[in-house]
Image (tube, rainbow, N blue to C red):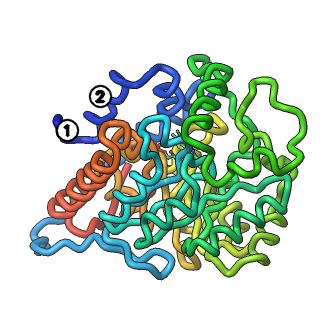
Amino acid sequence: MTDKLASVKEYEDVYKQRAQEVTSLYFASGTDEEITLEQNRKAFKRLRLRPRVLQDVSSIDVSASLLGHRVDIPICIAPTAWHAMVHPDAEVATAKAAEKMGTCMILSMHANKSLEEVRTKTPKGLKLLNLYLFQNQTLTLDLVRRAESACYDGLAVTIDNPCVRNPTKHHNLKEFASYSRRIIDNHGYGHLEKYLQGYDLGPPHPNGLPLGIRIRDLSATWQYVDWVRSKTKLPIIIKGVLTAEDAILAVNHGADAVIVSNHGGRRLDSVPATIEALPEVVRAIGDRVEVYVDGGIRNGIDVFKALALGAKAVFVGRAILYGLAHSGEEGVHHILEILKSELIRTMQFADKLVKVVC
Ligand SMILES: Cc1cc2nc3c(=O)[nH]c(=O)nc-3n(C[C@H](O)[C@H](O)[C@H](O)COP(=O)(O)O)c2cc1C
C-alpha cells in the first residue's frame, strides 16, 4: 500500500476526494435532512468517559464471544450493499480481511458476490447472511436454505427497511439506479442473481431501482419473523431495533441477538442516534440476549463507549467501505487494525470502563 493512513477519518477524506460523485453520495449520504446521520456521530462525541487509573492495564483482552463463537475483536462488519462499486474484489476482499482479523461479518443481501463464493473463499470465522423479508416467501426460504448449505453461522434479518428510502436532495436516485445496473451487469448481483428472471416481480420501478429493493414485503409483521424462525435452526439476529418495545418483541419472536441500528441514518430520519438508544435496549433485553450496536462508529473511543454502555460488540458500515475503496482487502484489514489498536489504547487509559456520562 503506497499511502498508509493513520485513522478512519483519513480514509474517509481520501475516499471523498477520489470517489465518483454517484458512489460517494450513495455510501456517505443519509436520508431527508440527514438529522439522524449527523446525530449518530454527534451523540458519540457528546459522551464523556469517566476513567479509573492504576488498575493494571498491562494485559488487555479485547476478544469476545458472539452467539457462542469467539471473535478476536468486538468490532464486526455490518452488511453494506454493492462492494463492487468501490473495489472489483468486492465482498470477497472484505470477508478475507474479516477472516484475518478473526471477526464477524454480515454479508449484505445486496452483495455483488454470491453467498456461496464468499463462504468458500473465507471458510473460517463467524459469518452471517443478511436477510430481508421478501414478498415472495419462497425466495426468502430459498435464501435461508442456501445460507444453511453454505455453512453460514446465522441470519441477520433487517427489519427497518421495508420501502425505498427518501434520499437527501443531493442523492439522485435515478442516476444511482442506472449506475447500480451497470455494476450489476459488470460484477453480478450476488445471491439475488438467479431471481432476476426466476420470479414474477411485477412491473419495473419507475426509477429502475434494482430488484432487491422492490420486492420487500411492506405488509410484514413479527409473524414473518416467527415464520423464518420456524424454518431454520440458524441463530437469528434482528437488525434495526431502536426501542425497548421492539427489542422485547424481537426476543419474544425468537431473536438470538439484536442490533441497535438506524441503518446508518439511511432510513427514517429523526430517529435517535443509536448510541442514545442502546441503553434502553440493553436495559430491556440485555439479560436475555446479546445486544450489538452500529451507526457512526469511526474510532476506538466510539467502540469503547458502546461496549461501556452494554453492547457486546459493535458493527461498522461506512468505515469498512472507505478502507475497501482505498486498497481492497488490505484497506479493510487496516481499518479493523486501527479500530482495534485505538480500542486497546483507550482501555489502557481508562481501564475496564466503569461509566460513561453525558
Ligand atoms: C452504502 C450502505 C449500504 C448498506 N446496505 C445495507 C444492507 O444491504 N443491509 C442492511 O441491513 N444494512 C445496510 N446498510 C446499513 C449498515 O448495515 C449499518 O447499519 C450502517 O452502515 C451503520 O452505520 P455506519 O455506516 O455509520 O457505520 C448499509 C449502509 C451503507 C452506508
The amino acid beneath tag 2 is Val
**Count of picture labels:** 2
Which residue is pictured at 58% across the width and 79% down the height?
288
- Which residue in the structure is indicated by mark 2? 14
Question: In x, y percent, where is residue 67?
Answer: 51, 77
Q: In which image quadrant can residue 315 be found?
A: bottom left
- 335 to 269, vertically: above or below: below
Q: Which image quarter is the N terminus in? A: top left
Question: In x, y percent, where is residue 198?
Answer: 82, 51
Which residue is pictured at 22% across the width and 54% down the height?
342
* Crowding near the residue tagged with mark 1, few <14, some 14–19, many ≥20 C-alpha atoms within 10 Å: some
Asked if residue 200 can be seen in this view, the reply is yes
Which residue is pictured at 58% across the width and 65% down the height?
258
Mark 2 and mark 1 in contact? Answer it, CB < 8 Å: yes
- Which residue in the structure is indicated by mark 1? 5
* Towards the viewer: 276 or 127: 127
Which residue is pictured at 55% across the width and 28% down the height?
34
Asked which secondary structure carries label 1, the reply is loop
Establish whether ligand 1 lies closer than 8 Å to the Cβ of label 1: no
Asked if residue 43 can be seen in this view, the reply is no
Query: Between marks 2 and 1, how big is the CA–CA gap?
Result: 9 Å
